[in-house]
Structure formats: structure tokens, C-alpha cells
Image (tube, grey):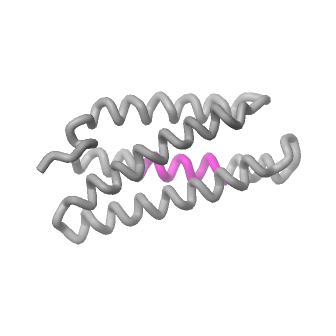
Amino acid sequence: ERTVIGENTLAAQQQLGEAAQSIIRMCLATELNPSEFCSLCYVVTRVAFELARSVARGQTLEAHSQARELADAVQVFLGSLQLFLSAAPGTPDADSDKKVFLRNFSQLLKLMKGAFAVL
């Protein structure tokens, strides 16, 4: 049985890649547009959850474990996003939160890449 992500894997990967590049560019910029930034993070989150759902449709324990790991990584990503956006710009906390956010984002992207590979 083909899933929605499975049928549109290339489109989902392209959408994810474009959003990821924009998020990284925005993190490197001096000014951050929170509304646009959150919209991009929403795209990543939506693709990640759809991907986790698609992977979980596999009937193996490994597929379910991978889907759970991906869903957990999304929650960590969203938590670090909240901290990053709530820190006052230009403060040490903001710099630290940005590093944590980027590390969690990188981990999420790595897990998503692995999930796309099994579809």
C-alpha cells in the first residue's frame, strides 16, 4: 500500500529541502521574521509527522521504532524552537538557544533523511 508521502516523496523532499535552507539562512541573519520562521518550521514539522506516519505503516518493529524516534525528534525540535524564539535577541541565552535549536534541527533532518530512504 502506497502512502501519501510515498506517492509524493520527491515533492515532500523538495519542500523540506527548501524550508530547511530558508530556516538555516534565517538563523544566520541578524534579523529574524518570527512569523515567516514559524511558517517554515511548520512545513518541516508537518512533513516530519507525515513521514513518521508513512514509516509507521510498515509492519515491522523497526519501522515503528523509527517512526517513534522521528516523532520524538519533532517534539524536541519544537521545544528548542520555543526556547529560541522566546530568548531576547542578542543575549547569551539567545545565542545558546540558537545553537541548541540548530543541533536539534540537524538531528531531525538526519532522521527524516533516513525515513525517506525506507519509503
- Residue 58's x, y, as percent? 19, 60
Q: Which residues are magenta?
A: 100-110
- Residue 49's x, y, as percent? 40, 52
- Residue 31's x, y, as percent? 78, 29
Which is more toward the observer, 56 or 30?
56
Q: Residue at x 53, y 60 (%)?
A: 75
In terms of image quadrants, where is residue 116?
top left
Q: Residue at x 76, y 52 (%)?
A: 96
Q: Is residue 52 above or below residue 91?
A: below
Q: Residue at x 27, y 37 (%)?
A: 9
Magenta stretch: residue 105 in it? yes
Q: Is residue 53 left or right of residue 81?
A: left
Q: Is residue 30 above or below residue 58?
A: above
Which is more toward the observer, 26 or 53?
53
Dominant SS of magenta comes to helix
Q: Is residue 45 left or right of residue 89?
A: left
Q: In the orientation shown, which residue stands out farthest toward the bottom?
A: 61
Q: Is residue 50 above or below residue 35?
A: below
Q: Is residue 60 above or below residue 52?
A: below
| Number of marks drawn | 0
Which is more toward the observer, 77 or 1?
1
Magenta stretch: residue 51 in it? no
Q: Residue at x 65, y 50 (%)?
A: 81
Q: Is residue 62 left or right of residue 75?
A: left
